[in-house]
Amino acid sequence: MEFRFIYITAGSESEARAIAAALVEERLAACVNIIPGMRSIYHWEGKIEETDETILIAKTIKNSVPAIIGRVRELHSYDCPCVASLSIEDGNPQYLDWLARETA
């Protein structure tokens, strides 16, 4: 089984909580970490923007990635939300077994 971290940014902590709750309740992710207080600087529509954001890190299996991307796009306030999948190459076998069970 292949495991993934999904890196997501949200415009507020309340939006991050709503997304995290949906992903866990729907068993798309076993766990989602919420890290408030990130500052982002980026190009958007021809201008440089600076925004406070909240980071989400969802733990899941590879097969759930397309559904997570779709669900985040449905729930997110941004036109183009950041949702990126990162491969987990190795880890605590007990933890990875738990992750697999919780996303089954």
Image (cartoon, grey):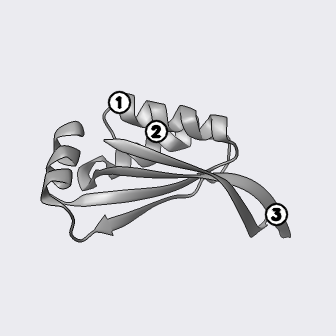
Left or right of 100, for residue 56? right
Give the tally of numbered discs.
Answer: 3
Residue 63: x and y in percent read: 24, 50
Q: Is disc 3 surrounded by few (<14), some (14 to 19) or many (20+) residues within 10 Å?
A: few
Say which of 45 and 60 sits in front: 60
For the residues labelled 3 and 2, the Cα–Cα distance comes to 26 Å
The amino acid on which the numbered mark 3 sits, given as a three-letter code, is Glu
Q: Is disc 1 surrounded by few (<14), some (14 to 19) or many (20+) residues within 10 Å?
A: few
Q: Are marks 3 and 2 in contact (CB under 8 Å)?
A: no
Residue at the right extreme of this rendering: 47
Disc assigned to residue 50: 3
Q: Which residue is mark 1?
A: 26
Disc assigned to residue 71: 2
Q: Are marks 1 and 2 in contact (CB under 8 Å)?
A: yes
Say which of 91 and 22 sits in front: 91
Left or right of 32, for residue 12? right
